[in-house]
Image: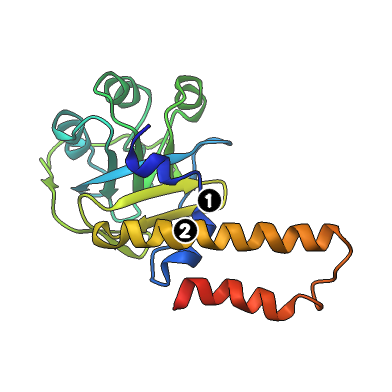
Amino acid sequence: MSTNDLARGHSSATLSEASGLATALCPEIRSLWAGARLCGPAFTVQGAGGDNLALHHAVLQAPPGSVLVADLGGARFGHWGEILTVAARQRGIAGLLIDGGVRDAAETEALGFPVFSRNNAIFGTRKDFHGVFGHPVKVGGITVHTGDLVVGDVDGVVALPAPDTQRILDRADARVAHENELMKQLRDGRSTLDLYDNFKAVRAVTTR
């Protein structure tokens, strides 16, 4: 197991709260298919809306295990589909996070390839813009750098800055341990109001 032990199994919500930073992408960025989970270091791609040539080049350039993080300006075109999914899987790419449209949802799910996008669209694309790679991009309102840790699940997506990842994961571990103790007390008959100060302590884990 790699990528910080697959982000130690924490949800995007837990990681967002534990970060104490602006790490959560806007809620419009959602998984293409139910149950998809994204986890890996970002490889950033600046493309152009309605043009998917940059994504073809990115599949060849991205290291195995990385997540393609592509800024397509939120454009409602089918920038990604089954053919690119097969190519990406063959190259060992861990998934796609794209601020733009994708298509071929059923085929992508059948291949088990995690895709998180702003929209689904079937409009075709041109192939003119080569793309810019490895530079910061803005996806879902958050600036993402190559190497940042991207985690996506049913709740949403977070992008954790690479220099802060270890600290955030440690805080997430502490937060989950504290929440587990609170839930044990709730099952033993305590109320949430009884435990209000303890709930505040959970929040303190993420801000101190």
Q: Position of residue 192 (x, y in %)?
A: 79, 72
Residue at 48% across, 59% down: 172
Determine the residue positioned at 69% across, 60% down: 181
Is residue 143 or residue 149 the one in the foreground?
149
* Residue under the point 35% across and 56% down: 159
Asked if disc 2 and disc 1 are in contact, CB closer than 8 Å, the reply is yes
Mark 1 lies on residue:
11
> 10 Å neighbourhood of mark 1: few (<14), some, or many (≥20)?
some
The alpha-carbon separation of the residues under discs 2 and 1 comes to 6 Å
Q: Is residue 82 visible?
A: yes
Counting from the top left corner in percent of width and height, residue 158 is at: 41, 56
Out of 86 and 166, give the one closest to the viewer.
Answer: 166
Instruction: State the residue lying farthest toward the right.
Output: 189
Q: Amino acid at mark 1?
A: Ser
With respect to residue 128, does 109 lie above or below? above
Above or below 112: residue 121: below
Q: Amino acid at mark 2?
A: Leu
Indicate the secondary structure of the residue bearing disc 1: loop
Residue 15 — which label? 2
- Give the image location of residue 1, x and y in percent: 38, 31
The C terminus lies in quadrant: bottom left
